[in-house]
Amino acid sequence: KRNVTITGEAFFDIAHDKTKPFIVNTGKVSIKVLGTTFNVKSYPEDKKIETTLISGKVELTTKDNDKGYTLKPSHKAIFIKENNDLSIEAVEPADIIAWRKGSLVFKNTPLINVLEELERQYNVEIDVSSEELLTYQYTGTFDNLDLPEILEILKVSSPINFKLKNNKIMIEHH
């Protein structure tokens, strides 16, 4: 067997080999690969684990459930850690793996999730002064922009102001 454990986000392109199954473990979800390309997003601090199938076939099993789920291409499995719920939805694969080319794509994404991605991508700490801002929905694509450029775009398109000091950003309502 070929076993790997992931913390964070990774893109896999796995050759089919019946004699050596490739298995990705996230702690709560195991993904058995049957010759495929797919993306796994599993950060310890996130409330969910996401597996997106680009091509081929994968089977998912959860730690608390022996039932397997087969994922089809252009679909994403979302496992909610809090209640061990697993759902599957159709997605645009190019948006999911855009991070590999330095792009971030958001579609009706709560600002809290946008800021989490920015913290990871740019290795900064972001504090938000208003809980109300965290639910603001953002749709847009950032193509290879630096952090100040992204913050300016967010400022123009949402009700925020920001202050950048050292490696810390303060976001407030304007």
Image (cartoon, grey):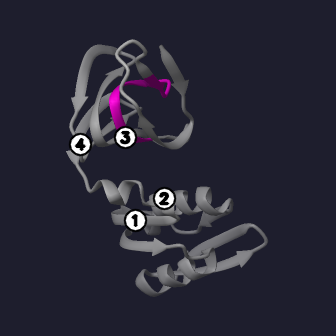
**Residue of label 1:** 105
The residue most toward the bottom is 156
Q: Earlier in the sequence, mark 4 or mark 2?
A: 4
Tell which tag, 2 or 3, sits nearer the viewer: 3
Decide: is 93 above or below 10. Answer: below
Amino acid type at image mark 2: Trp
Image spot of residue 7 (x, y percent): 57, 35
Amino acid type at image mark 4: Pro
Q: In terms of secondary structure, where does tag 1 sit?
A: strand
Q: How far apart are marks 4 and 3 (CA)?
A: 9 Å
Q: How far apart are marks 4 and 2 (CA)?
A: 19 Å
Q: Magenta stretch mostly in which secondary structure?
A: strand
Instruction: Name which residue lies at 55% across and 41% down.
Output: 8
Residue 37 badge: 3
Chain part drawn in magenta: 23-40
Q: Residues within 10 Å of mark 4 (few under 14, many from 20)?
A: some
Image spot of residue 101 (x, y percent): 50, 62
Amino acid type at image mark 1: Val
**Residue of label 2:** 99
Q: In terms of secondary structure, where does tag 2 sit?
A: helix
Decide: is 92 above or below 90. Answer: below
Residue 73 badge: 4
Q: Earlier in the sequence, mark 2 or mark 3?
A: 3
Q: How far apart are marks 2 and 3 (CA)?
A: 15 Å
